[in-house]
Structures are given as structure tokens and as C-alpha cells.
Image (cartoon, rainbow, N blue to C red):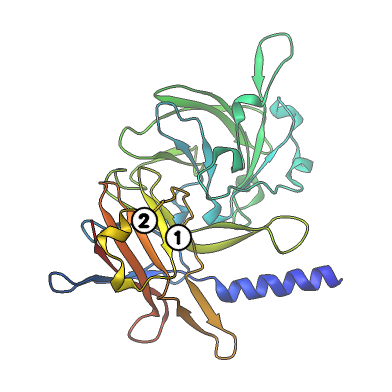
Amino acid sequence: MKKTSTLILFVLTLMLMTSCFKKEDALTLVDGNTTVTQLNMGADYNKQIFFDLGTNTFKTNEISDWDICFDAKPSGYGVFINNGTNVLAKKTGSYSPLDVTYEDTFNINLYDEQTGDLYKSAIGDWTKYVRDFGGGPVNGIFILDLGNKLLTKDRYKKISIIRSDDTSYSIKYCNLNEAKWETYTIAKSKTENFTYFSFKGLGQIVKNVEPEKNTWDLEFTQYKHIFYNQGPDPFPYKVTGILINPNHVSVYIDSVTNFNDLTPAICSNLKLSSRRDIIGYNWKTIDFGTYNYSVNSNINYIIKDTEGKIYKLRFLDFYNANRIKGYPKFEFIRVI
């Protein structure tokens, strides 16, 4: 009971600490000064926003537009789930759709870590999930839980990833109560980091979720963060924060230097990280006495963008002019 109470308290605390975004007009200051921008992710934080530092522009889509995505690099074979809509996965240990039943929906608890590491994703290295029963290799079956907002017949999908090559993937899938596979070939995007797929209807590739991979730097979105210090087991919790573009974007976090003192000389000698959640969600906190959010403007983010240019960025506020929360405001300026 004590463990349960602690967990409930932790979840409630996180719900108060975790927040999202909203955008409206960007304000560009005079030459030589910073650019200030404010973003809007919707009342329920249902938007993904892809932001480009070089042009101060963004693209928005509904986070629920897709369920899984596929690494589009010619050598890539990673398959990732949409943690922002609470998609979960489970390795069933079965190789025939006839062997996967409703009982397999219990304890579906695999999720992606948003570091960008294939081996820390829910699906993981599916190329090793194979058995040969004498008639050739057979790929194993996963169950995907697409979220409790769907009816059971649409909520659970059996899926098997068959192959990946330089240009495409091949997958088989069906509903939980079915045993006849649907086969789908998913072409790798030549211009985006991932190819996105939705199981709505008969299944479909979702185009233009993200902009071309060379045209954006930061993704404002919901995702699962894994807490490792809240008990004996890792604790996944949905947060809203920033992921960086895996295409050549990298970041260094500085909490010592004054923002205005970050010179080109300083910024050119830093060891930047390409971990996707390096900026993350915890640049904001809450006062539990007043329940007001604040941002830590003493944290600076030095960002190398897709073009190799270096910017410094910090957050300024989490409210709009009407004191409505969910409007993170940040300033940035190119330094190199």
C-alpha cells in the first residue's frame, strides 16, 4: 500500500510538473539582438511542431496522425512507436497469428526511450526475433496497443516486420481477432528522417508528418521519459518537451555562463550531444505553493543546426499575455 501511495504521489507530482506548448506570432527584434518566439501546441498538447532556427519558421501536425514510424536511412532498420499517443508494444513469443490471443494483451509494457537508440526502443532489433521451424525463417509477432480511446477490435494489432532493405520495409499485420495477414510495403522516404504509418482504416503511409530533414532543428512534442530513480523498476511517464532532429543537430547545456556572455569563442569549443532528448522537458518547474509555472532562464542551450550553424537559446516564459499556461517563449541568436 505504501508503494502504491508513493507511486500515486509521484504521478500527481509529474502531472503538475509536466507541460506543453503553444505558438503564435514570432517577434523578430532589431539586427544584432535575439529573436523571440512563442509556440502553441493546442489545449490538449495534441500538436507536434517542427521548428527551424535559421528561418524562425515551423510546421505543425496532429500527434495522433501516426502510430509507428520507420527509419528512412538506406541502412536503417529501426521501427519506433508513437509514445505521444501512448502506443505500447509487446513481444508475444509467437510466430503464427493463430497463436496470438486476447490473453497476450495483458502486460503490454514496452515503450521507446527517446534517446534515439534503436536498442532502447520497444521493437528493438527485430531482425533477431526469428525462428526456423524447418521451412525457412519466420519472423516473430508483436502486439501493439494503440491506446484505450479505441474499441478493442481496433485497439490491438498483431504485427510482424518481415524485411528491410535500402528502399523499403515489408510488414504483416492484422487485428487481434483475425488470423489473416495484411501485407504492406513501406517505402523509405528520401527526404525525411522517418516514414510514418497509421493503422486507421486498412492502414496507410502518412505523408508530410515532418518537414524535409534538412529544414528543421527542434521538435516540440509529447513523449515518454523514463525515470530511473523512483523505485526498483524504470518508470515511464508521458511528458512534453523538445527532441532534436537526428539529422546532424547537436546540443550542449550550459547552466553556469550568463546568456549574454556566451561568445563564439566559448561556443566553438564545447562537446555537443546528439541524444534526441538532450533538451527534454525539465527547463520548466512549478511552485507548489501557488501552482504557477516558471522557466529557468539560467539554462542555456548551445545548438548546432542542420546547416552547421551554432545558436544559443534559452526559455523566457511559459504563459501568454493572458496568463494562460502552455505558451513557452524562448529567445535565440546565431553565434557562429
Going by the numbered disc 1, the residue's amino acid type is Ile
Residue at numbered disc 2 = 218
Going by the numbered disc 2, the residue's amino acid type is Leu
Residue 28 vs 273, above or below: the answer is: below
Residue at numbered disc 1 = 279
- The residue most toward the bottom is 290
| Between 36 and 239, the one nearer to me in the picture | 36
Q: Quadrant of the C terminus?
A: bottom left
Q: Are marks 1 and 2 in contact (CB under 8 Å)?
A: yes
- What residue is shown at x 69% (from left), y 49% (from top)? 109
Measured as percent of width and height from the top left, residue 3 is found at: 82, 68
Q: CA distance from mark 1 to mark 2?
A: 9 Å
Residue 174: quarter of image: top right
- What residue is shown at x 25% (from left), y 51% (from top)? 309
Under tag 2, what secondary structure?
strand
Residue 103 vs 284, above or below: the answer is: above
Measured as percent of width and height from the top left, residue 295 is found at: 44, 77
Measured as percent of width and height from the top left, residue 242 is found at: 44, 59
Q: Quadrant of the N terminus?
A: bottom right
Residue 312: quarter of image: bottom left
Around disc 2, counting alpha carbons within 10 Å, would you say few (fewer than 14), some (14 to 19), or many (20 or more)?
many
The answer to whether one can see residue 47 in this image is: no
- The circle drawn on residue 156 is none
Residue 56 vs 145, above or below: the answer is: below
- Tell me which numbered mark, 1 or 2, is placed earlier along the sequence: 2
